[in-house]
Amino acid sequence: EIAAPPEFVHMMNSFEGHTFRVSSNGRESTDTTVTGDGSLICTTNDTHVLCDGRYTKHVVFEPTEADTETLRKACHTDLTDHPEDAKHFCARRFDNRLFFTHKLQFREELFQRMYTPNVQRRELYNRIQPPSLRNFTQTGFEIMEIPRQLQRSLADFWLQERLRTSRPENHPPEDPNLSGRLCDTWMLHLPAQLLASVSTTVRPLLAKWANVDLDGLRRTAFYGIRLYRNGSTLHRHVDRRDTHALSVIFEVGSLGFNDDVRSAAEWPLEIRDHSGTVHSVPNRPGQMIFYESATCEHGRPTPFPGREAANFFIHFAPRGWPEEYEAAPRQEL
């Protein structure tokens, strides 16, 4: 028995004869029995959970050593000129990461049945969420410099730890913004002292920029330093409205396929301002981008051409968010 949130389509491994009872946020539950070896796929509508268990046999595979060896060799080939990177990012101990296993377990057709509805839902939210919330600033974003000492601390930590303690992020494969099947991303978790330094430094700057009360501005979410590896794509999206009102991207660093850490492969941030204009913000290590992430559609929709881009994200919300910031309904003429 599964209680499923409505935001995503959920795919679950199953077997013939397995019966699921699925409900979601008060919707009427349904019982579905799998009639073929493979997977049960469930979606939601306004009143019901809809499940289908009638897939052909053998749509889910167990990866073999030969399968993973092929992917591992391809990883090494891509990093021929960077053997230290290959030693870490192509290591056998990470064979179970979703970027490898999901492609081996689930055929493309089955993946698309799960992924495509989420892409459609993302595009819907990009249209309907921004006008439902009040704006804090005129344009919705601003580019600033990371304070020098803080940038040095973040960059030093990244360079010292990227090949020691970074681990596969294993982002959900069905995530329409950043699919763990399609994008090889890794995570470096910040030590508590460095995270506190980031938060205390940026919070008053963000409050001033957004013209909100500093005492009421709370940190709602943060992630470690995300390492986007070659080919990663972050599709344009709006962030979750319950927690991500005001956000900051720290561009910690970037690595090309040469040995110069100062080189930055072009991978601009695309962001739609409050007037509807889409801006292309060139990526540059040492800059931070303040943005209203619940109302400004943003992403890096072109595949990353470099070896690695290191970004850190932190999110805040003012007191009363989101209930006190809902926009008045538009009047029909």
Image (spheres, rainbow, N blue to C red):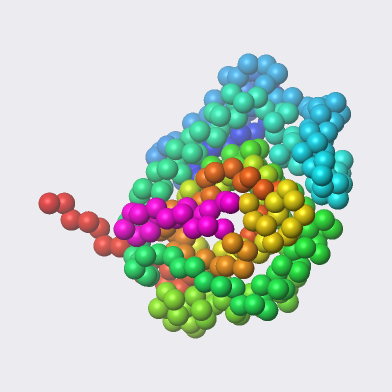
Q: Is residue 292 above or below residue 178?
A: below
Res 197 → quadrant: bottom right
Res 10 → quadrant: top right
Q: Is residue 293 above or below residue 256?
A: below
Name the residue located 56 percent from the left edge and 47 percent from the top edge: 234
Left or right: 73, with 55 as reference point? right
Horizontal and vertical percent position of residue 109 = 59, 23
The one nearer the camera, 162 or 4, is 162
Horizontal and vertical percent position of residue 282 = 53, 57
Residue with the most extreme left position: 333
Q: Please state the extent of the stretch shown in magenta in the rendering.
A: 266-283
| Residue 101 visible in the displayed image | yes
Horizontal and vertical percent position of residue 91 = 86, 43
Give yes or no for residue 15 being in the magenta stretch.
no
Image quarter hosting the N terminus: top right
Left or right: 77, with 148 as reference point? right
| Residue 132 visible in the displayed image | no
